[in-house]
């Protein structure tokens, strides 16, 4: 393997890790407060679609903002259903995923391009040019966000309030913390990051949107959360590892003689690794005691 191959794999890994890290860190914030959102896949898909519409209308920044707003709005609805209306979090998350599949597929048909919508060149987020290649500026955010999130959870009063809402909402309520509001804001922030991740995929990384563009990354982000044990720094490591295997799969598909192996077999490598990692750590991770349980004030 030459240095050029190594550099290529590294750059693909950095780009591939971004949506995983952003989504995983956002989910860590939400789960710390006690809400578990399995609808991340749907948020990524929907935000990728709306971001393309925004980029076509007002440029890449508008596209990213609309993607973030989409993720926050979907998460707001999810939080209202699961906190104030006491809905089941698992079912609400599945509903988001099912909604996204139909909404994006119908939206692409309505735009007159079933299955595919490209971002015009003026709508793509400009890359940062380096001697080794081009990098999206969102990569820098993905690298900086986990340490900041770690400090927020460990060193701030707001982070302590999140933990209290997830561990013992009754005690948090007695201490004067508005548990419902804390959970709602934490989930909205997580949705905002997932929305940014979806917008990044379409507006910055791939430059188009399809009805399968999320490609299971929302579920891999959930696996990254499990791997991290709700530690944002480990989420960065997990996101890079999963991104690395995705880049290796892409590299293998382009090797001479790789046509002898079905591309579907090679493409499943990141997902097999995800299953193995989750199977290895799932029993060792300690989640907040009230995770997934709606708080009912006595």
Image (cartoon, helix red, strand yellow):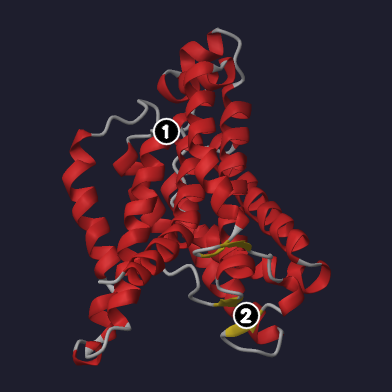
Indicate left or right for 88 with 123 as reference: left
The mark found on residue 293 in the picture is 1
What residue is at 63 percent from the left and 28 percent from the top?
Answer: 181
Q: Where is residue 279 shown, x and y percent of the image?
A: 18, 49
Residue on which the image places disc 2: 106
Q: Where is residue 121 shown, x and y percent of the image?
A: 72, 78
Above or below, 77 against 56 in this view is above
Place residue 243 in its image quadrant.
bottom left
What residue is at 52 percent from the left and 71 percent from the top?
Answer: 101
Above or below, 237 against 154 in this view is below
Q: Where is residue 188 shown, x and y percent of the image?
A: 62, 41
Local crowd size for mark 2, using a 10 Å CA cut-off: few (<14), some (14–19), many (≥20): some
> Disc 2 versus disc 1: distance between alpha carbons?
34 Å
Residue nearest the observer in this picture, 267 or 296: 267
Indicate left or right for 201 with 59 as reference: left
What residue is at 51 percent from the left and 48 percent from the top?
Answer: 22
Indicate left or right for 163 with 75 as reference: left
Q: Where is residue 258 shown, x and y percent of the image?
A: 24, 87
The secondary element bearing badge 2 is classed as: helix
Place residue 120 in its image quadrant.
bottom right
Above or below, 80 against 269 in this view is above
């Amino acid at each position: 393997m030459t240095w050029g191959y190594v550099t290529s794999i590294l750059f693909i890994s950095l780009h591939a890790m971004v949506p995983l890290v952003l989504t995983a860190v956002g989910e860590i914030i939400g789960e710390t407060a006690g809400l578990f959102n399995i609808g991340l896949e749907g948020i990524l898909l929907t935000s990728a679609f709306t971001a393309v519409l925004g980029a076509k209308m007002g440029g890449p920044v508008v596209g990213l903002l609309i993607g973030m707003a989409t993720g926050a709005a979907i998460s707001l609805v999810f939080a209202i259903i699961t906190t104030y209306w006491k809905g089941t979090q698992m079912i609400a998350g599945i509903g988001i995923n099912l909604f996204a599949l139909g909404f994006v597929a119908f939206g692409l048909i309505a735009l007159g391009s079933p299955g595919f919508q490209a971002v015009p060149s003026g709508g793509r987020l400009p890359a940062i040019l380096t001697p080794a290649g081009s990098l999206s500026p969102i990569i820098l955010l993905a690298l900086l966000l986990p340490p900041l999130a770690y400090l927020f959870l460990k060193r701030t009063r707001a982070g302590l309030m999140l933990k209290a809402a997830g561990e013992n909402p009754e005690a948090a309520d007695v201490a004067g913390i508005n548990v419902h509001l804390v959970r709602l804001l934490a989930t909205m922030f997580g949705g905002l990051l997932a929305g940014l991740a979806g917008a990044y995929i379409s507006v910055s990384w791939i430059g188009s949107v399809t009805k399968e563009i999320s490609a299971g990354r929302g579920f891999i982000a959930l696996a990254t959360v499990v791997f991290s044990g709700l530690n944002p720094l480990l989420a960065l490591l997990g996101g890079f590892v999963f991104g690395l295997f995705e880049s290796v799969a892409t590299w293998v598909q382009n090797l001479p003689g790789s046509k002898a192996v079905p591309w579907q077999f090679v493409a499943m490598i990141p997902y097999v690794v995800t299953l193995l990692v989750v199977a290895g750590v799932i029993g060792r991770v300690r989640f907040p005691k009230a995770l997934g349980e709606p708080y009912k004030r006595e």
